[in-house]
Amino acid sequence: MSADDEGYVHRPDGVDAESDAGTGGDGFGFRGWVLIAVLVVCLLVVPGIIYVRPGILSAVGIPYIASLLVLPLLPAAALGLTAVWAMTAAGRTDDEG
């Protein structure tokens, strides 16, 4: 054993230790920022609307109790769909590249 040998290190497909494998080198990218924007809307904007104007949907004919169920459901669905979109799109670009 030489002084340079520090033990076995597995590097699949010739990936260098110095490269940014997994991050792509450009940070979040477009998908990450879209996910952050949806997360901010879901965690700050919609709860703020529920707190300030809980009966906002009564103007379009939805009862107060139903609006307390619908208002949290919409951002939850948006966050779930955005997360699935971001992960499937990220997996698709990793396979191609």
Image: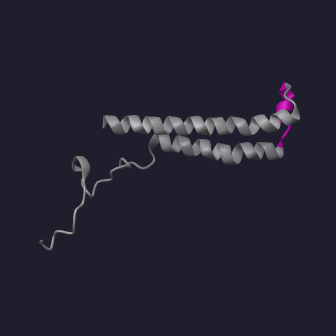
Q: Residue 18 falls in which quadrant of the image? A: bottom left
The answer to whether residue 95 is above or below residue 7 is above
In the picture, measured across the screen, residue 18 lies left or right of residue 79, that is left
Q: Main secondary structure of the magenta part?
A: helix
The answer to whether residue 68 is above or below residue 60 is below
In the picture, measured across the screen, residue 62 lies left or right of residue 14, that is right
Q: Residue 41 in magenta?
A: no
Q: Residue at x 69, y 48 (%)?
A: 44
Q: Residue at x 83, y 33 (%)?
A: 66
Q: Residue 62 falls in which quadrant of the image? A: top right
Q: Residue at x 38, y 49 (%)?
A: 23
Residue 29 position, x and y percent, is 44, 44
Of residues 11 and 48, the one nearer the viewer is: 11
Tally of numbered discs:
0
Q: Residue 59 in magenta?
A: yes
Residue furthest to the top in view is 61
Which quadrant is the N terminus positioned in? bottom left
Start-end of magenta stretch: 53-60
Of residues 97 and 9, the one nearer the viewer is: 9
Which quadrant is the C terminus positioned in? top left
